[in-house]
Image: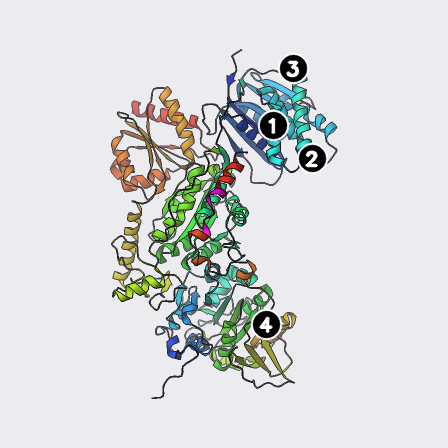
Amino acid sequence: MAEAKLNRLNLTEKDYDGAPSTMCRGCGHDAISASVQRAYYESSIDPRKVVKLSGIGCSSKTPAYFLSQSFGFNAVHGRMSAVATGANLANHTLLPIGVSGDGDTSAIGLGNFCHMMRRNVNITYIIENNGVYGLTKGQFSATADVGSVMKGGKVNDIPAIDLAELAITLGATYVARSFSGDRKQLTPLVQGSLHHKGSAILDVISPCVTFNNHEGSTKSLKYVKGHLDPIHDLDFIPPYENIEADYDEGTDHEVEMHDGSRIILHKLGKDYDPTNKAQAIQAIHGAIAEGKFLTGLIYYNPNRKEFAEELNICGIPLSELGQDDLQPPIDALEKINADFMK
Amino acid sequence: MDTPSINDLNICVATENGSGSASSNNILFKAIFKMGIPCSSKNMFPSNIQGLPTWYQIRANGDGYLSRKDVIDVMVMFNDATAAKDIYRVRDGGVILYDDSNPLAANLKRDGVQYIGFPANKLVAKLVPASPLRAKQRNMVYVGALAYLFGIDMSVIKAVLEDTFGKKPAVIESNLICIDAGYQYCKEQNYKQNIARLEPIPNGNKGKIITEGNTAAALGAIYGGASVICWYPITPSSSLAEAMEYYLPRLRKPKDGKKAYAIVQAEDEIASAGMVVGAGWAGARAMTSTSGPGVSLMNETIGLAYYAEIPSVFFIIQRGGPSTGLPTRTQQADISLMYVASHGDTRHIILIPHDMNSCFDFARQSFNFADRFQTPVFVAMDLDLGMNMWSSDPLKLSPEPFDYGKRLNAEQLEEWTKAGKKFRRYFDQDGDGIPYRTVPGNEHRMASYFTRGSGHDADARYSEDEHDYKYILDRLRKKFDTARKFVPKPIIEKERGVKTGIICYGSSYEPVREARDRLKARGLRTNHMLIRALPLTSEVRDFLAEHDTIYLVEQNRDGQMAAIIKDESPELGAKIVSVLIYNGLPATPLEVVNQIFAAAQSAKTA
C-alpha cells in the first residue's frame, strides 16, 4: 500500500477525519464534509486551532464527522451565529467554521445570521442548503423556490430567501455558492474561505436524497445538476506555494488574499469581477430569473476589518487573561469611591 | 402647632418626564446628603421620553432609615396633569409647594394642608432668556424654595453645583441664580412652615458614597474580570452595561495598547445570551445584563449552558411583569423564572444582593461561581436597587482571588496523561458533581471534545442511552447541591427567646429593617434572616425550625421564594406566612408592618 501523503504539518488527510457520519446514504452533506476535510488538509491548517460550530438540523450534526481533533459546539437551533460570535470575541486566534442548514440559517436563525454578516465576524460559514427540513421529515424551508413541490404534493408559493444575496447586502466579505456534487469547485472555495479574515459564507446546494429528491422539487439532484450556472472555474493557491498558476491574462481574474494566497478565476462566459458588489447582486438576480443556480466566488471584499479587529481587542485572547490583566488596581476603586462622595 | 421634627422629612416632587427635573432633584438630594443627613431617593418614572408624570421622593432621616416612606410631608406640585391627585398624596398637616404665577384652580384646593406659592414661571422668565432651557430652570426654583423653607444653606447648594458641574462655571451660575430666586422670594414673603427642619449633622455622612446598584454591579463585574459583555437595551438594566462601557476603558489597563475586553450591543436578548455562552465556552469571563423579558427570551440558551456546563453570568434587573408589564417599576417577581430557567429539569445558582456593597461584591464573585460550577449564574437585582440612588459605605474589594475552577490547561493535561489519568469532560471525577473542563485554544492532544445541547455521555459523546442521560442529569443535581455549601450564607439577626422570624431578600431588606424596629416599638420582637442566594443553605431550615411563625416578605404576588422554601422543606415551610407587596413601587415599612399585624390578628381569631 502506498504511504499516505503528508501535508506541511506532516499530517495525512486521515488525520482530519471525524466520527462516522449518520447522514442518509448519498446525502450531499457527506460530500461537503469531505470537501471541508480536504480543504483543511490541503491548506495544512492545524486542526487543534479550529473550532467547529453548528446549530440544529441534519447539517448541524456534520461537524462531528470531520476534524475530530478540533473542539466542537453543536448549539441550539438558529443560534450558531451568536455562539460563534461570542467564541470569536473570547479567542480571536481560533479558526472557526460554522455549519448550518437552510432552516437553521434562513428561518429560525435569520436575525442572528444577518447581524453576524453586519459585524463581519471571522468565520467560514457553510450553509448546507436543501430547501427542506430533514430531521422533522420534509417540511419546506425558507429557501424553497416558488413552484417547488413537497413530497406529499404541496406546492410552495412563497419566494425563497437567497442567502448569498442577503450575505452580500449585509456586509459579508467572502460569498460563494456551490453544489455538493461539484467537489472540484467546492474544495477551492472552502479553502479560500479558510484563508479569509471575515465572514465567509458558502451557500452550498446539497440535495436531500430522502425528502426533496423527487420530480417537481427544484432542489433535487437531477434538477440542480441541470440548472447550474458556474461563473468561473477556480484554482486555489496557498501562500506557501510559489507556483505559477495556469493564468490567462486575457480571461482570468486573480483574487489575492490577506495571507498571500490566491484564487484564480478562469472565465467561463461573461467577464466577472467578484469585488463589484452591484454586479454580484445583479448576477444573482439574473440567474434566479433564468431559474438557475449561480455558482462560484460571487463576492469578495478584502477591505473590511473583521469584527474582533474592529473592536480593537488585544492580541492575547481574552480567554487567556488572568486576574493581573483583568482586575483594575485597588486605588482606582478608592478614587471612584471618592468621586461618589461628592 | 406641633414643634417641627428634626431631620425627618419626606419630600415628593411631581413633575413631567423630560422636564429636566432629574437635575434639580439630584441637586436637592445631594445637598441633603452633604449636610450629613442620611437620605435616600426613589424615582418613580414612566416608560416614556417626554410628557408622562414622574414622581421623585427624597427622604431625609436622621435615624438612617432609607426605604421609601408611605407618608409624604411635602408635595412639590409641578405637574398640572397629576396635581388634582397629588394634593391628596400629602399627609394631613403637610405642605404643598406650587407655582403661583397663575391662580390656583379650585379643584386643587383642599383643607388640612399648608399651601406655599411662588411664581417660578415669572421668576425664570426674568432670569433666563427664552429658550428650551427656561422650562428646565423653572425646576431649580423649587430647590431654592425648599432650601429656604426647610433649612438647606445656599452655600451647601453651591458646593453641590460645583461638584456636579465643576468645569462649567456658566452652568453653575445659571442654575444658582434660579435656585437663589426661589430662596429669596420665599424669604421676602417671610414664609414659614412648622413641620420639619433639616439640620446639618457634622460628619453625618462622612465616608459614605452615593451610587446606584447598576453602577456598583458594573464595577464589580469589571473587578471580577468580565471580558466579554454582550447586552441588549432594556429598562432597567441598560445602565449596568452602559456603566461598563464608561468604566472599562477607564479602569481596565490596555494590553499591547488594545482593549482587554469586548463589549457588544447585540441584536436581541437571544443573541446576547448566545454570545455569552459562546464566549464562556471559549474560556472568557462572559456576562449579559437584562430584565425579565430578556430572561424569557434567553431561556433556551440558559438551558444549553446548564446542560453543556458553560460558565456564564446573567445580571437580571427585575421590573414589573408579566409581559411588558411595568418597565420602569420594581418587582422581585422573576425569582422562579431564574431558578428553573429553560425547559427540562434545571436549577440555577442565584446571587441576591441587597445593598450597594453586595451588588459590587456579588457581581465580582459571580464569575468565580460560574467558573467553579461551570453553569449559568444569575445576579438577581431589581429596579429599586439598580436605578435608585443609595447612600452606602464605600465599595470594598474582597481579597478572594479569581478562581477558574476545574479548568485544565495543556501542562495539567500532560501531567494527567503521565499519571495515566484520562480527561473525561462530563465525568464526576471528584464526587462533587463538578467535572473538569478544557477550553478551545488548549492544544494538548487530549483536550478537545464536542460540546452539545443534545444527549451526551460522560465522555461528551452523542448518546441517547437512558443510563448516560440519567447519569448527567443526576450529576447536575449533585453539582447544584454542592453549590449549597459555597453560596453566600444568609445574614441572621436574632435574639434568644424570640419566636417570630422575618425572612426577606434583596431590596426588601431596607423596608424590613425599619419595619422590625416599628414592630418592636409596638411590642412585637422579631428575628431576621436575609437570604442572599439560591440554592438555599442549611441555615434556612434551621431558622424555620427555630421559630414558631415566619413572615416572608417579598415583592411579588405569588410568594415565589416562599414556594421554593416550601418545596424543599414542606413541613417547616408550613409556618411561612407570606407578606407580599407588588404594586410596582418599592416596598415600604408601613406595608410590611400592616400586613404582619393583620396576619397576626387573623391567626389569633382563627
Residues indicated by labels 3 and 1 sit on the same polypeptide chain: yes
Residues indicated by labels 3 and 2 sit on the same polypeptide chain: yes
Numbered range of the magenta stretch? A326-331
Q: Which of B266 and B245 is in front in this view?
A: B245
| CA separation in Å, label 3 and label 1 | 21 Å
From the viewer's perspective, is residue B380 above or below residue B58? below
Tell which subunit mark 1 falls on: B
| CA separation in Å, label 3 and label 2 | 30 Å
Dot 3 alpha-carbon crowd within 10 angstroms: few under 14, some 14 to 19, many 20 or more: few
Tag shown at residue A167:
none
Q: Name the residue carrying label 2.
A: B170
Residues indicated by labels 2 and 4 sit on the same polypeptide chain: no
Amino acid at pointer 2: Ala
Amino acid at pointer 4: Tyr
| CA separation in Å, label 1 and label 2 | 16 Å
Q: In which image quadrant can residue B468 be found?
A: bottom left
Dot 1 alpha-carbon crowd within 10 angstroms: few under 14, some 14 to 19, many 20 or more: many
* x 62%, y 30%: residue: B79
Sequence-first disc among 1 and 2: 1
| Secondary structure at numbered mark 3 | loop
Tell which subunit mark 3 falls on: B
Query: What is the x, y in percent for residue A142?
Result: 51, 66
Amino acid at pointer 3: Asn
Q: Name the residue carrying label 3.
A: B190
**B174 left or right of B522 in image:** right
